[in-house]
Image (tube, rainbow, N blue to C red):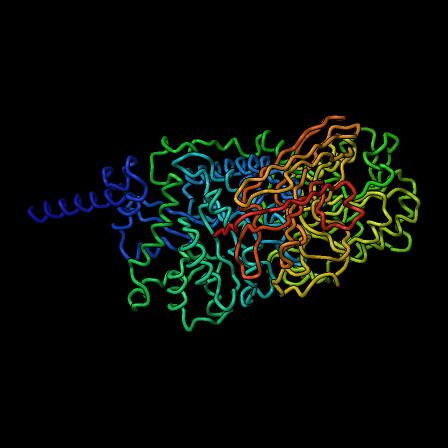
């Protein structure tokens, strides 16, 4: 009998232990929501074993039931909508198209919608019990704020273009929209990537050693990261695959220890790019064995591994390569993010925990996707006012590989909407319009059955021919995800020329004597010289998201007045480009390129014309004082339209190492026909500083040129007729600035 009693008692004690493992005591400090997050994090970490700590430093972090730590997968994406989810979500234009809107306010609004949908997916995943699954979490590895220095880079369309200021403004808008404005909780966690000198070549990224001097580092590659960390308080940073001056970026003394932690005092978390730590061994060959590689990564500040090597950190501690206390530094940063996301608090206290599933693809989100798609389209040519189309146009021949290509317009790192409207879909919805459609080619080769010598005759009765071509994210993109056809390698492009077969087809169509409109979908600059010279109208449409077709139709028929501007330079030839592997900014982008271009940075037409007058600013200014610049802008057209007013600076009179010009401010403004408005910009002393050849940042005495207009002043003269300029003399003591 005593044995039976002892057995029952043991079973009851065991059951109680299991129950306590599942439900931790409610009064432990880390569950006390009245305490500061730092104290709660410290308390939770102090209760974890070494093995438990290590388990939380991998992107797939399995739960610890005895402490109430839930399963969590850190890997999620939302470049332009919740990425790769099994749920249907709203898909906005690819980031390069978002940059072409020059509209940070609307991007922030879109990002807020994206984070709402991300919360809805996460909340649904909690109910389903599958938060360990990839693409369900709240830590989004977005935005990509690398500088699109070379149009051959396959991942450039994930960025906001070639300019550091525009990149920072759009990147900060994305971060603010994603993370929300609650003083306690993050709506979602954004992550600035890839820190910091990273932009191809894709096939070499696991072994490549990028080199840039101090001037380019401070002037081009670091500013956007600095501003996202210091101004928008981005909560995460992803280190890059490549090396920089010999050290892997995820084990870099300069990037992670000195700049990020010491100089910038970054208090968020750092994640590796996926399997980047493995490259320490297999690609860069900078470390002799796995334990030294993972220890070095953690010691330099890579807190989380997207990969599978950090599971051996227990062995690294036992081998004396790293201490448990050093792991705690990283672990506390990771747990702080999870606390800020509300994962350890009663859900009724977390303002975002109640976002319903019904927010996915709700009408307001779909309307915003259309708005951003419209604003992203750049009208590059409109000879004889072909657009908007005349009511006499009744029969349209819609041709080309992107005329009905839903895959192209969704870009990469994309989600999947319920409705994805192509241009063919949109034109078929137009009243009294007959559409004849054919894809004709797969971008590079003629489609089966297409006879190049006779195909054009089929379309001789059309009132208008629209050729929707370009390329695809299946051709340009990340290594392993794109490429493989002639002109493309490992995700990158080997040539910036439009595939020859497409130009040849447009020549045959043009010979019919019908107006031919070229719509180019691409994520990068394409050299379509013949099209720009010979065809009456050209639209750069990027990868426009789920509403790309509707947006294009609205522009074609005049329901929307185009307002997009180029966030990158369109060069004429491969010969204009320095070697791809060269990370020097010399001869790159509008800031340093001195040759002729097809289309310049900041350029884009409207159905209206805008006149700039009365550029006002002081002729002299003391260093250390703010500068106010005013300009009057008038809509001289017959349609209401949006204009992007752009302010540029040039320090060339002070130093020859500075850019020819550099964007300093911009503002998108809506003007009614005949409306006149004065736009005002304020520049700080830091804005008026320049980076010298040593990397020092200073405002010094000398002449600074101011330019205001609707295109960069380094553009060829045929584009800059309406540009206003004025010299500013800075006087006084030198003011030195630090990052």
| Residue 426 image position (x, y, % from top left) | 74, 35
Looking at the image, residue 547 sits to the left or right of residue 533; the answer is left
Residue occupying the far left of the picture: 2
> Is 298 above or below relative to 375?
below
Looking at the image, residue 27 sits to the left or right of residue 505; the answer is left
**Of the pair 715 and 257, the residue shown nearer to us:** 715
Residue at figure coordinates x 52%, y 52% from the top left = 193
Residue at figure coordinates x 86%, y 29% from the top left = 391
| Residue 160 image position (x, y, % from top left) | 61, 47
Residue occupying the far bottom of the picture: 288
| Residue 232 image position (x, y, % from top left) | 48, 42
**Of the pair 684 and 382, the residue shown nearer to us:** 684
Residue at figure coordinates x 38%, y 47% from the top left = 71
Rendered image quadrant of residue 678: top right
> Is 426 above or below relative to 686?
above
**Of the pair 280 and 217, the residue shown nearer to us:** 217
| Residue 228 image position (x, y, % from top left) | 50, 46
- Tell how many labels: 0
Q: Is residue 86 visible?
A: no
> Is 684 above or below relative to 700?
above
**Of the pair 349 and 70, the residue shown nearer to us:** 349
Q: Is residue 674 visible?
A: yes
Residue occupying the far front of the picture: 732
């Amino acid at each position: 009998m005593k044995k039976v009693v002892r057995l029952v008692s043991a079973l009851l004690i065991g059951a109680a232990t299991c129950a306590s493992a599942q439900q931790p005591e409610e009064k432990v400090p880390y569950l006390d929501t009245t305490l500061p997050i730092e104290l709660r994090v410290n308390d939770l970490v102090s209760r974890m074993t070494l093995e438990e700590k290590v388990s939380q430093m991998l992107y797939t972090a399995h739960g610890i039931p005895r402490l109430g730590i839930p399963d969590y997968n850190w890997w999620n994406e939302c470049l332009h909508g919740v990425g790769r989810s099994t749920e249907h979500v709203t898909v906005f234009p690819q980031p390069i198209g978002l940059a072409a809107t020059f509209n940070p306010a609307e991007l922030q609004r879109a990002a807020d919608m994206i984070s709402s949908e991300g919360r809805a997916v996460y909340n649904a995943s909690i109910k389903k019990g599958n938060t360990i699954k990839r693409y369900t979490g709240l830590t989004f590895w977005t935005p990509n704020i690398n500088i699109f220095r070379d149009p051959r880079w396959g991942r450039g369309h994930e960025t906001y273009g070639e300019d550091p200021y525009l990149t920072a403004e759009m990147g900060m808008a994305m971060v603010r929209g994603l993370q929300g404005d609650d003083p306690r909780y993050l709506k979602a966690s954004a992550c600035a990537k890839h820190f910091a000198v990273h932009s191809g070549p894709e096939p070499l990224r696991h072994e490549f050693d990028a080199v840039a001097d101090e001037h380019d580092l401070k002037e081009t590659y670091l500013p956007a990261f600095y501003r996202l960390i210091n101004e928008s308080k981005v909560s995460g940073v992803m280190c890059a695959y490549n090396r920089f001056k010999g050290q892997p970026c995820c084990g870099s003394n300069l990037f992670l220890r000195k700049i990020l932690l010491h100089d910038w005092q970054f208090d968020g978390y750092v994640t590796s790019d996926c399997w980047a730590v493995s490259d320490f061994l297999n690609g860069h060959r900078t470390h002799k064995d796995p334990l030294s590689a993972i220890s070095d990564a953690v010691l330099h500040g890579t807190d989380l591994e997207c990969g599978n090597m950090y599971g051996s950190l227990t062995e690294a501690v036992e081998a004396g390569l790293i201490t448990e206390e050093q792991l705690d530094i990283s672990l506390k940063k990771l747990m702080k993010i999870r606390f800020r996301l509300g994962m350890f608090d009663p859900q009724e206290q977390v303002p975002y925990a109640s976002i319903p599933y019904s927010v996915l693809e709700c009408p307001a989100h779909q309307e915003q996707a259309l708005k951003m798609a419209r604003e992203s389209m750049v009208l590059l040519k409109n000879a004889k006012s072909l657009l908007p189309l005349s009511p006499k146009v009744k029969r349209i021949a819609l041709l080309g590989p992107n005329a009905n290509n839903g895959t192209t317009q969704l870009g990469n790192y994309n989600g999947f909407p319920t409705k994805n409207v192509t241009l063919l879909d949109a034109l078929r919805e137009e009243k009294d319009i007959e559409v004849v459609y054919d894809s004709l080619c797969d971008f590079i080769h003629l489609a089966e059955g297409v006879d190049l010598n006779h195909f054009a005759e089929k379309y001789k009765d059309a009132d208008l021919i629209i050729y929707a071509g370009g390329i695809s994210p299946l051709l340009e993109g990340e290594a392993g995800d794109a490429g493989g056809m002639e002109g493309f390698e490992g995700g990158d492009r080997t040539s910036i020329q439009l595939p020859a077969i497409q130009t040849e087809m447009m020549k045959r169509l043009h010979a019919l004597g019908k107006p031919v409109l070229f719509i180019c979908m691409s994520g990068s600059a394409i050299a379509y010289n013949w099209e720009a010279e010979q065809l009456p109208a050209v639209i750069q449409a990027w990868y426009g998201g789920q509403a790309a077709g509707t947006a294009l139709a609205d522009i074609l028929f005049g329901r929307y007045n185009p307002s997009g501007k180029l966030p990158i330079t369109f060069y004429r030839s491969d010969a204009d480009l320095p070697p791809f592997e060269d990370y020097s900014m010399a001869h790159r982008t509008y800031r340093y390129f001195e040759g002729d271009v097809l289309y310049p940075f900041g350029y884009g037409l409207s159905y209206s014309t805008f006149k700039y007058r009365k550029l006002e600013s002081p002729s002299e200014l003391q260093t250390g004082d703010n500068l106010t610049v005013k300009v009057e802008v008038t809509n001289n057209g017959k349609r209401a339209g949006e204009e992007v007013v752009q302010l540029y600076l040039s320090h060339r009179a002070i130093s020859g190492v500075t850019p020819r010009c550099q964007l300093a401010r911009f503002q998108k403004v809506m003007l009614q026909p005949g409306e006149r408005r004065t736009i005002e910009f304020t520049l700080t002393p830091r804005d008026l500083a320049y980076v010298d050849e040593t990397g020092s940042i200073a405002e010094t005495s000398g002449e600074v040129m101011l330019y205001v207009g609707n295109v960069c002043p380094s553009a060829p003269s045929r584009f800059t007729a309406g540009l206003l300029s004025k010299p500013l003399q800075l006087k006084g003591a030198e003011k030195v600035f630090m990052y």
